[in-house]
Amino acid sequence: MKRQLEKIYLNRKIKHCRKIKCDSFFEKVGHRGAAPSTHYSSTPQKSITNPFNMEDPGKKHPLAIKAQEIVDTVFALCADLEGDEFSKSYQPLLVEAATMIGAKTYSGTKTDSRLLALQNAAIIRYQAEFLLTSTSGMKDMTTANHDYLNVLRKEILEFQVLFVEWVKYIKTELDNDMEDEWGLFE
């Protein structure tokens, strides 16, 4: 019972910290980890905020909500990474994978095209598997906070259950409206 309460407390603590860590991460790395802009513009740059604003009604799909949780956890994990350069080298890769999951989930759940939805699903699956593999490597080879890694793994596995249901829906309910010229999704 005590272990369950500790897990519940830890999950609440991490969820509370994600928003703070996410904002902190954007302040640290700037525009999603990209190099500073080299163009010369007289207009001021907008400040960077979380690109996955849940106020958009299209992001109410359960898969999109879970994708947002993954994005927030990755941002919190990256903001918490300290120490050696090897640990920090994971940051852009994790952020890219998480934001790709969020973007492709959003566009995949909004389309009525079976082909486009399956293409997005393939990309989402690849990026989610990358995050799972990365968390295993980070546990063994970096100084990353294991609590964040465990929560991230748990969220990805919960995402996977929703993902499987969504793919079943795609295959049964959406019309095969386009020909896949590559022959992958028939």
Image (cartoon, rainbow, N blue to C red):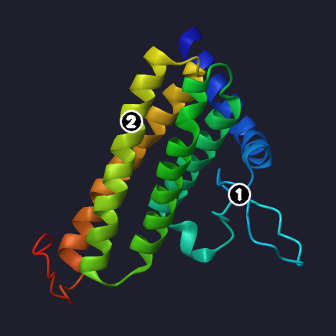
Image position of 40 with respect to 100: above or below: below
Front one among 180 and 151:
180
For the C terminus, which image quadrant? bottom left
Which numbered marker is on residue 136?
A: none
Q: Position of residue 38 (x, y in %)?
A: 73, 65
Residue 139 in the figure: left or right of residue 59:
left
Local crowd size for mark 2, using a 10 Å CA cut-off: few (<14), some (14–19), many (≥20): some
- Residue at horizontal 71%, vertical 57%? 31
**How many discs appear?**
2
Q: Residue furthest top?
A: 2
Image position of 85 with respect to 111: above or below: above
For the N terminus, which image quadrant? top right
SS class, disc 2: helix
- Residue at horizontal 59%, vertical 9%? 2
N-term mark: 1 or 2 = 1
Q: Which residue is mark 2?
A: 132
- Residue at horizontal 47%, vertical 50%? 97
Rounded to the nearest angstrom, the CA distance separating label 1 from label 2 is 25 Å
Q: Which residue is mark 1?
A: 31
SS class, disc 1: loop
- Residue at horizontal 36%, vertical 33%? 133
Kind of residue at badge 1: His
Q: Residue furthest bottom?
A: 177
Q: Is residue 85 visible?
A: yes
Q: Position of residue 120 (x, y in %)?
A: 34, 67
Q: Is residue 1 visible?
A: no
Kind of residue at badge 2: Leu
Q: Position of residue 104 (x, y in %)?
A: 44, 66
Local crowd size for mark 1, using a 10 Å CA cut-off: few (<14), some (14–19), many (≥20): some
Image position of 34 with respect to 149: above or below: below
